[in-house]
Image: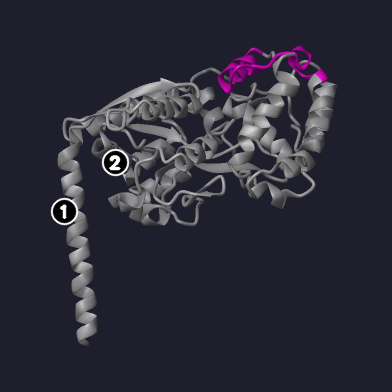
Amino acid sequence: MKLSTLAAIAIALGVSTWAQADWSQTQNEAKGQKVYFNAWGGSEATNAYIAWAAKEAKTRYGVDVRHVKITDAAEVVKRVQTEVAAGRTGDGSVDLMWVNGENFRKLKNGGLLFGPWAQNLPNWDLVDLNKPVRTDFSVPTEGYESPWGTAQLTFIADRAKTPTPPRSAADLLAFAKAHPGRVSYPKPPDFHGTTFVKQMLLELAPNKAALQQAVTPAAFVTATQPLWAYLDQLHPSLWRNGTTFPASAAEMHRMLGDGELKMSITFNPNEAANLIASKQLPATAYSFGFTGGTIGNVHFVAIPVNARAKAGAEVFANFLLSAEAQTRKADISVWGDGTVLDINKLPAASQALIRKTAPGALNEAVPTLPEPHASWVEALEAEWLKRYGSR
């Protein structure tokens, strides 16, 4: 064997030993730490899963995870900004947060994230690198956030009342006109509502490639002109004539169950199955997408630069990436959130559970459309609120 080969092996072994020792040190430091995990609290299934993961982290690693239930990650971003500006550089109130898109971009550009750290996690080796885990709404993650799950915009309807759903923006407009007052979407900046607006933008924009670049005033005007014309036509046929909008997807689910709406919206292709199982929707509920595709993305967890319990946050994030935690999360009877792992690296039992489907879940192939660049979100929300928010 060549000397250079031996040296390479020795270096590799040395790096591996160092990495193991470094992670062991992180685990030791994490013991006893309280991790304040700021994460959306609008889903019973999600909240129950986080409670399970927190209990496991306490038992296995001695890390005390507290779920701080939030409604909008943008408010958490503002809190971190305020704390750092006020000089709270090491005793912040947020240790880990569920984040992606524009909120990640703001934190990263503002130097408000700890890292890079994500690619040093032991369970990073299980991640499916063919998924968009190294970019977030076209912004490179560069190890400043760890992938947690996948999502895709999905619509829900009741087959007993809506056997043939709309399959495009044009179909939806015709459907809304045929069923006045029975269609709506959440009010932006609720992320489901903003995603609905982005979905229509992706379908209607004359130059879709421009949406993958940072927004400029000129590009915004050109790309969104068909969108506003479309919404101007759509809104008069919506629930309450488009003068007010549901506050959330959860409210739309209730309205669908009550028969007030003919459609609801989710970012989890398996959520309808959970809603059926919990008797919130009838057994005839089903999921569908648009023929041309719907927006999909990866959601992440990130550590603010001023977090108190950075080691504990890393240990918890690593557990969230474990085969056990990802398989449980993907189980439709638990949450049904898509995995970010390469399932070919998982045990056969895990693979079977992840591939399992259930009545009501999305069981058709819907192309995944890339998110616009994160910078489009704020511009879209501001213009939407200017045009429709005060009606």
Q: Is residue 65 above or below residue 280?
A: below
Q: Nearer the viewer, residue 261 or 142?
A: 142
Residue sitting at x 19%, y 31%: 59
Q: Considering the image in quadrants, where does the N terminus appear? A: bottom left
Q: Nearer the viewer, residue 220 or 18?
A: 220
Is 195 situated left or right of 108 in this image? right
Q: Which mark is residue 21?
A: 1
User: Pointers 1 and 2 in contact (CB under 8 A)?
Assistant: no
Q: Amino acid at mark 2?
A: Glu
Q: Quadrant of residue 223?
A: top right
Is residue 202 highlighted in magenta? no
Q: Quadrant of residue 235?
A: top right
Q: Amino acid at mark 1?
A: Ala
What secondary structure is found at the residue carrying circle 2? helix
**Where are the magenta residues, as a range?**
236-258
In the image, residue 330 lies at what x, y percent? 43, 39
Name the residue furthest bottom: 2
